[in-house]
Amino acid sequence: MAPTTNGSAIFNEAPERTVNNNTIAYSKDSIDIDNVPLNGGILAKTLYLSIDPHMRLWMNQTKDAATGPGYDLGKPIWGIGLALALRSEKDGVKSGDFIYIQIYPFQEYNILSADTPVRVVHPEPGIPLSAYVNVLGMPGQTAFYGLEMIGNPKAGETIYVSAGAGTVGSLVAQLAKARGLKVIASAGSNDKVEAMKQKGVDVAFNYKVEDVAEVLAKEGPIDIYWDHIGGPQLEAAIGACNLYARIILCGALLAFNGAAPHHVKNLAEILYKRIRVQGFMYWEAEVEVEGHSGNPVKFINTLTPLVKSGQIRWTEQVFDGIESANQAVATALTAANTAKVVIKVADP
């Protein structure tokens, strides 16, 4: 067979602040999918790619082991991918398997080395494949593991979720609601407030219109705070916390695009109220909750029936083709975005 075009999303230029038209460039090469050596690995055909806000951190040219190795100029960006194994020499993966990869180069085809961690996905009837890079992928795992490991939610408690209309925030809110909690959530527009209400949030408000501290004083106190923002929202949440509250640090959106730092003034309350404050990465939390890595049984068994029944609702914005990567990443980082951004590269 003649060589097959293999398109790539190349990290072309480090953005000064926000992603611009030159940040990610489309490039193409060719690959002989029938004869390329695998050396014990897998030839993967890309189906869906996950676009996530934390990818902005990997565009910084200061490498930080705490957040990941970062992108290299002139090389494909990477993230979470769902692919089809076209050929495989790896134990446990056969041709025709759907595979989930956490660190996956954004190319139409990839040769995954024998030591690349992959998880075989068994799609459920009635659930689209894109769900496995969305509610049944990293965003869902983040929400589930963070709540389980740090939040320890109990029926009758109250949780406050900042950025509650976002992909992870909306899943946190719905999982908490399913566990019998009162859910307070904020977002930065009236459209997002309405979206949160439609997903069952008890108290949804626009933090640009209503004062966070005043809302929490009225609707709280709170037992759990899921923090996506940092800064003033964290300060307000600390002030509204009950004794022995749990604060889950999941993001710092104010810092992602270089916003000026905000110095939280009431940190002493963490001591007085005996508040647990913890950040986490979902892959580490997976080991804590599941007892192992790479086979998220508790997560899949919990989320799948909730998704199939419609008790947990999810949204997505799909971009077509790997050449749309720059636009997809820019969209995921805009304040107006509420849907999970994914790129559909190919059908199986």
Image (cartoon, grey):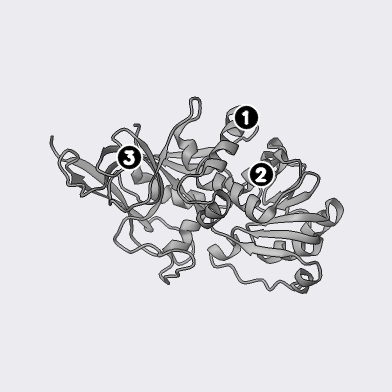
Q: In the drawing, what numbered circle is on residue 192?
A: 2
Looking at marks 3 and 2 on the same chain, the residue that comes earlier in the sequence is marked by 3
Query: Could you tell me residue 222's position as x and y percent?
Result: 79, 55
Q: Residues within 10 Å of mark 2 (few under 14, many from 20)?
A: many
Which amino acid is tagged 3?
Answer: Val
| Contact? badges 1 and 2 (CB < 8 Å) | no
Residue that appears at 74% across and 72% down: 267
- Binning the other alpha carbons within 10 Å of mark 3 as few (below 14), some (14 to 19) or many (20 upward) gives some
Which residue extends farthest top?
125
Which residue occupies the foreground of this view, 284 or 331? 284
The residue mark sitting in front, 3 or 2, is: 3
Q: Is residue 290 left or right of residue 87?
A: right
Residue at 31% x, 53% y: name it.
115
Residue wearing tag 3: 93
Q: Is residue 13 left or right of residue 297?
A: left
- Mark 1 / mark 3, whichever is N-terminal: 3
Q: Amino acid at mark 2?
A: Lys
